[in-house]
Amino acid sequence: PPRMERVTGLLEKMKLLASEKKGIPEGDLQKASENAHTISESGTGGPVLRVPMKFMAWNCRGLGNAPTMRGLLRCQRSVQADILFLSETRLDDRGMERIKFSLGLSNLLVVKGDGKGGGIVVLRRTGVNVTLRTYSINLIDVDVVEDDGFAWLFTGIYGEPRMELKHRTWKLLRDLHGLRDMLWLCAGDFNEILHHHEKEGGAMVIGVLGQL
């Protein structure tokens, strides 16, 4: 089956780091790490309920076939992601419109790929406040504000697949990093490896990331 990447618990860790800067007692942070739904803040008269946001990223390698679509629906039923980033969809806006409701997600940002390949999309449930910053055929960059007002940045990445162009992906991320002014999450398919054992089949190559 297509490879799926899931980012679990990272957003809650980001919240804990932000809370730590606000001076929440260490004991309360420990409690929150064990039970991510509740952070007890002294002086508030009771716990503050935080519902963790769920996120999933997947290179689906084409959504135009039934087995891949069934796999995606099965994953979404299991994870119930609030934000879903897909790469290599090979679909345009019209094709994704037909799919989003099947996933239980009502909003989407679509970037069509170059030619017959590529294609990236961010889907989100109703109520998730997402504002587009910038996009290209390789990324979608957005602001996210959660129900409790917690704000962060998300960049969905589909790295350059061609070896001679891979440096563009990392230059783009360096440029974005210079513009970040809040917590930032990057996820997706970077089309990059650090070590030879991460690669299956084909000629052995040294990724650009390992040269940085």
Image (cartoon, rainbow, N blue to C red):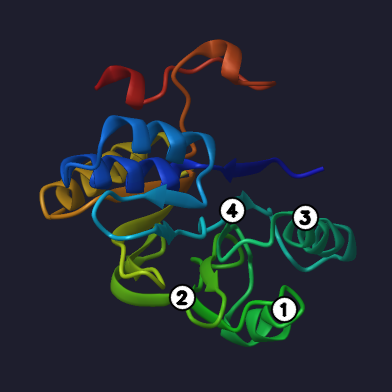
Which residue lies at the image location 62% right of the left edge and 50% below the top edge?
59
What distance separates the C-alpha of mark 1 from that of mark 3? 17 Å
> Residue 122 location in percent, x, y?
50, 68
First in sequence: mark 2 or mark 1?
1
The amino acid beneath tag 3 is Ser
Nearer the observer: mark 1 or 3; the answer is 3
Res 56 label: 4
Q: Looking at the image, can residue 158 be seen?
A: no
**Residue position marked by numbered label 3 in the rendering:** 78
The C terminus lies in quadrant: top left
**Would you say the residues marked 1 and 3 are in contact, meaning their CB atoms lie under 8 Å apart?**
no
What distance separates the C-alpha of mark 2 from that of mark 1? 19 Å
The amino acid beneath tag 2 is Val
First in sequence: mark 2 or mark 3?
3
**Residue position marked by numbered label 2 in the rendering:** 128
* Within-10-Å neighbours for mark 4: few <14, some 14–19, many 20+: many
* Within-10-Å neighbours for mark 3: few <14, some 14–19, many 20+: few
* Residue 46: quarter of image: bottom left
Which residue lies at the image location 24% right of the left edge and 46% below the top edge?
18
Q: Looking at the image, can residue 128 be seen?
A: yes
First in sequence: mark 4 or mark 1?
4
**Would you say the residues marked 4 and 1 are in contact, meaning their CB atoms lie under 8 Å apart?**
no
What distance separates the C-alpha of mark 2 from that of mark 3? 19 Å
> Residue 160 location in percent, x, y?
42, 46
Left-right relation of 94 to 119: right
Res 99 label: 1
First in sequence: mark 3 or mark 4?
4
**Would you say the residues marked 4 and 2 are in contact, meaning their CB atoms lie under 8 Å apart?**
no
The amino acid beneath tag 1 is Ile
Left-right relation of 2 to 133: right
First in sequence: mark 4 or mark 2?
4
The amino acid beneath tag 4 is Met
